[in-house]
Amino acid sequence: MRLSIFISTVFIFFLTSPAIAQNETEQETDKIKPVSISFISEITAHPPLQYDGTSEIDKQAIRTISNLVEALNNNPEINLTVSLPPATLSSLSHSKIKENENLLLELKNLAKKQLHIISSPFVTSDPESWRLINSFENYNDLLKRGDLQITNQLQIQPDRSFAFISKSAVIETLEVLSKLGIKNFITENSHIDPKPNNETNPLINLKNQKGEKFDVLFSDSKINSYLDGIKNNSTDVEDLVTNLSSLLMNKSVEEKNVIVKIPFNVSAENLNKIFESFTTISNLRIKPLPSLVENLNQENLSDNNEYFLWNNSSKDLSEIGPAQNLAKAAIDAYSEVIGSPHPNTSFLYELLATTSAAELVEEQISSYYKTIYEEIVKIIDSFTSPKNQNVRLTSRKAELPFTLINNLTHEANVSLILQSDGRISFPEGQTFEVKLNPGTNKIKIPVSSRTSGNSQIRIGVRSPDKNHLLQLDSNSLSITTTRLSGVGILLFVGAVFFLAFWWLRSRRLRSINK
């Protein structure tokens, strides 16, 4: 109640003090425009999927989401732009705990009326880190996976045009993010250099060397710090009144817009107090963030001074990037073998995405890779062929029988890579695509023999992806050709005719001599 009285008092002072200070007439005071405010929230979480396939949902993140849901249900006038952790939403959907099921249902309902949900990566990850190692497609994959989970779990398409940016972001980060559809970048005042003097109308334009403009929004740092004080119970109403009175004085009649970021993990009780206080203030408009930005652009209220992003150092992903790319190629090949979609493939891709989580340390990441490769090795070991397979050919062209055993419980796709010692050729090419049933498979390989005698071919069984990355099995076949080739037959016939001609000529000469 004290907080509600405080904020009401402060905003009344904010709206009326210019008239008192400047002894304005009542007519001039009436010209003061209302203040528009938008609430935003960024919620991150530790990745729930563990390397062994179990799930551990971040309790603090769940508590934060639960408090937010409760406060929004109690204050239907509030609209909130929020970034939610998609991996956590996915785990909530698989949870058998009733409270988690209800929380996901509440989020789904709020997404239809009070929540403006924006895109966020599947797990917490810094786009600038990926840009620096020329692997930004990895971050793009995380965004796509995040969007898919939000759409699947909340039945709403997240807004890709807005995004929170980390403190490591620079103008080049905005360039690559803009190519993914992001148009409005949300950050904090401390990330901008120099700091904007006026935190109302919080929209600045950053330019790159090409002259391209990028819209950057920032939350009000002082109000945010005061709300942090409320969250931590280190600030009371009297302190807030003292500190905010100068901030909230409106000495002009121009329209004012403010963005307030809700502190992470604030209690439901304090959230209710904050929201209730703002909803009781006259001349205050609570707007969804897109509406506030649209108004800023229409009224040309953006700050066009020259600014830069004062960035912190990003996490070094120079070792993670190549390892992820190799693992992804291996999973892609694995997927080609067992066919997709398949639950095992989805599980491996999710494990791989989780390795990008900023919260993980190197040892934890290694455990995820170990699980991925152990599963791939199981597939590699599932194909065998009997050794010493010998074949006898009695014609120049034939179908070579080859036995290959699929020890999986389902169909599999493989490529046979054929190599010859030069005496055998392959009319249909050296790569042979085969679908294997579970158990023993008899495969017929079209061949052509160039000459009689003994020869050998090498058969490599590999994954059917473009690069045939996985070697599943390898074997050699010994071939004995007993029938003469076409050239041999012609030579033989020619020799017979020559001998017959010689015999007839010799017999005729003997007859003449007699």
Image: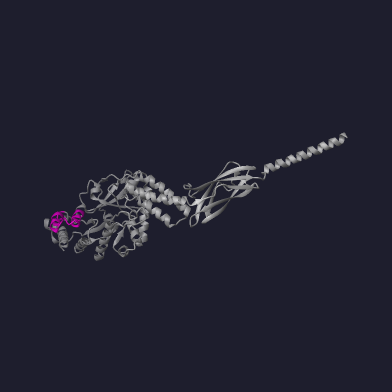
- Front-most of 305 and 470? 470
Corner quadrant of residue 299: bottom left
Q: Is residue 231 left or right of residue 390?
A: left
- Front-most of 195 and 407? 407
Q: Name the outermost residue toward the right.
A: 514
User: Which range is magenta?
Assistant: 224-246
- Specify whether residue 432 is painted magenta: no
User: Can residue 22 be seen here?
Assistant: no
Residue drawn at (49%, 54%) of the image: 407
- Specify whether residue 228 is painted magenta: yes
Secondary structure that dominates the magenta span: helix
**Rendered location of residue 162, percent (x, y):** 31, 54
For the N terminus, give its image quadrant: bottom left
User: Can residue 322 be seen here?
Assistant: yes
For the C terminus, give its image quadrant: top right
Residue drawn at (34%, 61%) of the image: 95
